[in-house]
Amino acid sequence: MLTTEDFTHFPHQMWEKVLSKVKKAVVFMDDKCTEALHWSGGAAALLEAGARNLKQFSSFEACGANEPKAVFVVSTLLKGRTVDIIKDIISLSHFHYCVVFTTVAHSVHLLANNVTAEMEGTPVFEQFEEKLCEWMGNMNYTAEVMHVPVVFAPVSQQLVLTPTFAHLFPLLLPDLEMINARRPEKKRFGSLMDIDMHSLPAELQLEIKSLASALNTMFEATATREESFAVGPMSRIIAGELASHPQAKNRRKTAPNKASIIFVDRTMDLTGAVGHHGDSLVEKILTVLKPLPGHVTDVQVDMLELTSLQRTPHSQNTLAPGCLAQSQSPAAQSLWEAMLTSKHKEGVMEVRRQLVEAASKEKLPIKMSMGRVTPEQLCSYMQLFRSSWRALESHCGVLQLGLATAQALRHPSLPRWDSCLAFERLLLQALGDSGFPTVLRQLLPLMRPRGGEDSSASGSRSREDECGPDELILLLVYLYSLADEAQPADQDAEEEVLEKLERELIGALTLVITRETELSPLLQKLTGCSNPEELTTERAHSAVEDMFETLQGLSHTRDHLKQLRSIYTASDGVHQATYRPFLRQILEEVFHPDRLECPDIEHMSGGLTDLLKTGFSMFMKVSRPHPSDNPLLFLFLVGGVTPSELRLIKEMVTTHKPGTQ
């Protein structure tokens, strides 16, 4: 029977195709493919397969005369800038043999070149092979171009991410306005749910087709017939594209294995994505530590404590950072699984247990201590390994996860996590008693520059636990995602009050951002500026105004739903108001013993058969496919998932369907 291991092994199978070509080659790889490889063995896998070197995919890289073979691995179409970079590298080198792997299928290349007819073979790739020989300077040299979907990153036994599609996010109201602006007035869409694939920008269409193609390859490799379901506008489009994929139709006729896949738009519940209620160690690590350069799924771990180097302003540049991805060590993988799916306290205890176990195995003089785990205690255990290079090498994976834990626990911004959590709880209680503007107004006192006179006047709050612009933006997203749950009021009067309040908030947040001495990655993305010197008040104000336009749309993302419209339970006088995770509600529907049909979980694989069933159901009882019909269930969150949601899913499956994977 098919298991989750078959799917977490699939990315490794795809990389095997690349590894089979890298012997004696210099490998050039772009950031997105490098990140996928990072979770599937990393650079070590390439070097073990015989690669001579791994270089950045850049026009500023080249090879010497004694390096005749190159392998390029890219996550883009073989067009435009990608082609220019490949040409530049080849022109500056002395290659006799070039292999190019692209994660984009040949069918998508045809569409990108405006070819809609089905064609024999792979003419786009064949033409590119000729160009490669031309650039190498001899048409008799060897060139190969092929498609391999190395887009999946197996982060854990039950979590696979797609870093290549990290920026693919569900549609929002500003997207609807942009799409409608290009259409005749009579053909404009009334809501996001009305948007179809062909009305999307060409670049987004190609990206969705590329994702559908990669998913199809995964199901093909595992001989799986999937039933697709969708919740949300973008999920409907992706699921529809997978259902209508030409190769998928043939596969579904003969594939012996069965699985259900539910696509869910992240925008159905952004409260779960930005809230601080998760009680997850990994969530805190990912929040407070800096991202690994060029990555979106891993962070930098400072390795200085495992060396005898002194900490100086330049010591970070002396030593390569560690990370969370530890695919080479079974002990580290087991610890990572525990950290990822346990509560914060349990995760920290497991880190200590594994460090003690590793130190005991190496006969290091460890001093046992019970009670609360502190970052100082963890560091004292890890520093013991400095005395033995062999011990350091043997347990390097566990030590990196231990360092990540200690560095997160003592990070100066961690107190802000608790401040945000406390404030989110207050906002939840207020939502059940007041209108949305009243609740939103509670954020206004927080909107003041950090370390300013206003904040020091309060006395009780230190700079560490003051909310910075990043936390304020997260609180705004948290609240706007719950706006529909507030007490209803006179709509016209409320709109006027809300409009005035939003102008105040925009002004206050603009001031907060312009007073920052350093711009966080979030602020850099929001404003388009890399440092405070570039950022003018006008530019900050304009960026915040645009952000509020997007926020206003968040309160309507569940408007089209019939049953799962609420993610909030108001206080009943005995119990406090609580947040009800959207994913929990979906899984409750999926695992309901009566197999009730939920109108919001739309079946997308049926095509004409489903339409006929819909017609017959007017006269007789017709059974439709249900997500719980199959032994394997995939949840595909378009826009990302949090570690605490991963734990929630695991708990729900264990409780309701112990046999389901």
Image (tube, grey):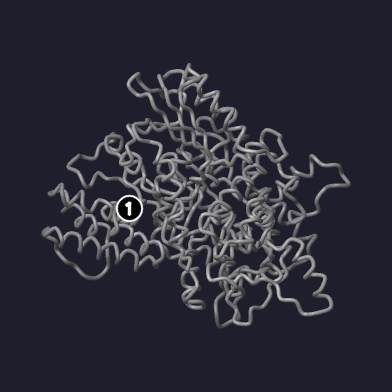
> Visible in this render: residue 255?
yes
* Outermost residue to the right: 186
Q: State the residue in front, 113 or 526.
A: 113
Seen at 40% across and 19% down, the residue is 94
Q: Position of residue 337 (x, y in %)?
A: 37, 62
Q: Residue furthest top?
A: 137
| Total labels drawn | 1
Give the labeled residue for mark 1. Answer: 404
Where is 648 relative to 275, above or below?
Answer: below
Please tell me in which quadrant of the rendered image residue 596 appears. bottom right
486 sits to left or right of 392: right
Q: Position of residue 171 (x, y in %)?
A: 67, 50
Depth check, front residue: 233 or 123: 123
Q: Is residue 443 visible?
A: no
Which of the 4 quarters of the picture holds residue 581?
bottom right
Q: Residues within 10 Å of mark 1 (few under 14, many from 20)?
A: many
Q: Is residue 374 above or below residue 522?
A: below
- In this rendering, the answer to whether 619 lies above or below 81 is below
Q: Residue at position x 37%, y 31% from top?
A: 25
Q: Residue at x 29, y 35 (%)?
A: 313
Q: In the picture shown, does residue 332 fall above or below 566?
A: above
Left of 234 or right of it: where is 151? left
What residue do we see at 65% from left, 69% from top?
A: 566
Q: Answer with the quarter of the image where residue 223 lies.
A: bottom right
Where's residue 516, x and y in %? 48, 40
Q: Nearer the viewer, residue 281 or 87?
A: 87
Question: Is 61 positioned to the left or the right of 115 in the image?
Answer: left
Amino acid type for the residue under numbered disc 1: Ala
**Percent coordinates x, y for residue 533 in the rendering:** 50, 30
Secondary structure found at label 1: helix
> Closer to the camera, 601 or 53?
53
